[in-house]
Image (cartoon, rainbow, N blue to C red):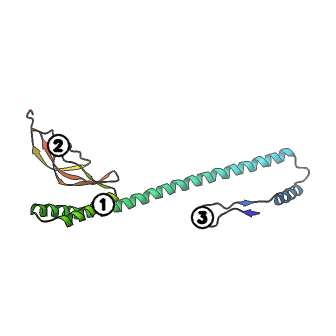
Amino acid sequence: MVEMSDKNNPDEVPVNVISKNKINNLSEDLTETISDNVTVDELQNLLEIEKQKVKDYEDKIKHVLADYQNLNKKTQSDIEKGVNTKIEEFMLDFLKIYDDFIRAKQVFSESKINTNGLDSILKNMDSLLSKYNITPIDALGEIFDPNLHEAISIIEDSELDNNTIVKELRKGYISHKRVIRPTLVEISKNNGEIK
């Protein structure tokens, strides 16, 4: 008998190969136990019964394997969702700090203060956002979309179409095709005058 399993691989099912001598011995033992008065039809019926048992066991194994594969996929999906949720929660907190750096850079630029250090920090922060698939939502000039934007004020402007975004008050972001923070915007309202 030769054992064909790799003990280092837990996914492999152990396989035992029976030698020809062992099969011949089993065949002789079986022949001795079967009495002469057993007919070929009875043996065929017994064989059919055993074949049906084997088929039933194969079906059960297939069902168990399918259940295992489905459970494995669901577990992987749940783990990925959990990790992505935690990353998004962290990134929302990080974005608050990022916004503060952007505001600081704007104030320093207006005051004619050198912002090279802040530029370097912001570049590193942009790289971190990109690494985790966090992308900004471009809103200025776009039509208001409640899935991406949150309007907090309306400006009357006969030159623009209704619901055109005229100002971004806070940048919004998308992570893995989901909005994690909508863009705060100011939108236009056309008062009905002809352009």
Residue at the image point whose x is 14% and y is 60% from the top: 106
Q: Tag 3: Cα neighbours inside 10 Å, few (<14), some, or many (≥20)? A: few
Q: Which mark is residue 76?
A: none
Label 1, secondary structure: give it.
Answer: helix
Label 3, secondary structure: give it.
Answer: loop
Nearest-to-viewer mark from 1 and 2? 1
Quarter the N terminus occupies? bottom right
**Type of amino acid under label 1:** Ser
Q: Residue furthest left?
A: 193
The front one of 150 and 126 is: 126
Answer above or below: position of 70 versus 128: above
Q: Tag 1: Cα neighbours inside 10 Å, few (<14), some, or many (≥20)? A: few
The front one of 186 and 2 is: 2
Q: Report which residue position mark 1 lands on.
A: 127
Q: Is residue 92 visible?
A: no
Residue at the image point whose x is 79% and y is 49% from the top: 46
Q: Which mark is residue 164?
A: 2
**Type of amino acid under label 3:** Pro
Q: Position of 193 compared to 9: left or right?
A: left
For the residues bearing labels 3 and 1, Cβ distance under 8 angstroms: no
Residue at the image point whose x is 75% and y is 48% from the top: 49
Q: Is residue 83 visible?
A: yes
Q: Report which residue position mark 3 lands on.
A: 10
